[in-house]
Image (cartoon, rainbow, N blue to C red):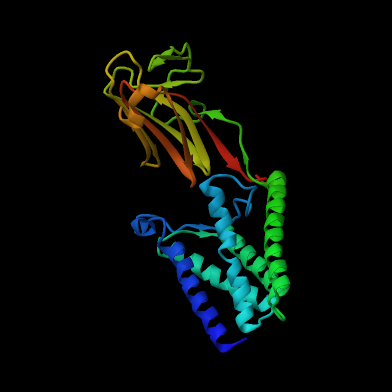
Amino acid sequence: MEIKLRKLIITGTILYTILILYFMFFAFNRLDHATGDYEYVFMLVPENVPLRFPEPTFSWLYQFGNIAAFIPFGVVIPLLYRSSFGKFISLFVLTILVLESLQALTYLGSFDVDDVISNTLGATIGFIAYRVGFSSKISYKKLIASALSIGVLLVGVIVVSETINYVIATRESPIQALHDVKEMNGTMPMTENLPSITVAGKKIEPKMNVYNSEGDKSKSYTYILGNKKDVILYSYYGIPDNGDFKGEVTILADGKVRAQFNEQYNKGAEFGAEFVEIPFYYKENEITIIVSGNAKLWDVRFSEMKHWWE
């Protein structure tokens, strides 16, 4: 390899590495959360498959980026230093483990084994592309073959991921009414003879429960989840047409506010009842709902994501 070309590749690799480090440590407003108010987060059990079929969502783009962004390293590192796959991938995994640990220890992110797997897959795909198109004399045909190998391998990752997801991925437990779990302060929602609710001219018939302040200034409902993890809370929120158009609902998990809705939520009730979906990613012991004014929360239920071995 010519000296000028080698220097150009090294310079490009350094600049690209700086870009990757920026996204790992500073992008997505990470500095705003870099305080000691949170616990170190080390996610050591795989939670998701690396890459699903393409979807027009940020989540899919993030998963794709976690693989694609590291493909160049699998090409340029062995191209510059002619290392074997075993040596290259061992050094790569060690580097990613260090960077993921630094993310967690500096509160600029979390240690996520899913990211380690995705990044390593990207580097592996890159190394295969290097062996196809760059390991010997480079030609136009080999470059095309190298690019095609990347596309084929990405499709292969998607197919394998979808298969794994179908067979052993996490599953959502049956949806359960929140009032069915143990309550803590003796306050229970309405569960029988539920009245209809009219919001923005639309008549609604609650089916499970209704949470309101029942004429008091505010009312609090607290439930014991028992340190459940990956819980998703579902409900509907609205302020009925009859009475003052004032009220608020606050949802807390272990004393921390996770969601709050009032008459200003989504510009008020002109859009009718609002469907609420609140994910709780970490272990939660207590869920508290505080309702004030004329606000109402109804059909409050939850589900829990479970791994196949659970």
Depicted 251 relative to depicted 244: above or below:
below
Residue 231: where, in percent of width, then height? 52, 39
Judge whether residue 92 can be spotted in this image.
yes
Q: Residue furthest bottom?
A: 3
Residue drawn at (66%, 81%), measured in percent from left and top? 83
State which quadrant residue 125 falls in. Answer: bottom right
Residue 202 horizontal/vertical position (percent):
43, 15
Image: 258 above or below 298 = below
Q: Which residue is the extreme one toward the front? A: 140
Q: Is residue 17 above or below residue 241?
A: below
Q: Residue at x 41, y 55 (%)?
A: 28
Write the residue at 41% across / 59% down: 27
**Residue 249 visible in the current orientation:** no
Residue at (70% x, 73% y) in the render:
140
The one nearer the camera, 72 or 52, is 72
| Position of residue 303 in the picture relative to residue 295 (left or right) | right
Give the total number of marks visible in the rendering. 0
48 left or right, relative to 274: right
The quadrant where residue 103 appears: bottom left
Image check: 117 left or right of 22?
right
Percent across and percent down for residue 47 are: 59, 51
Relative image position of residue 97 (x, y in whole percent) = 54, 68
Quadrant (top left, top right, bottom left, bottom right) of the N terminus: bottom right
Q: Looking at the figure, which quarter contains the C terminus?
A: top right
Would residue 77 be found to the left or right of residue 212 on screen?
Answer: right
In the image, residue 228 above or below residue 92:
above
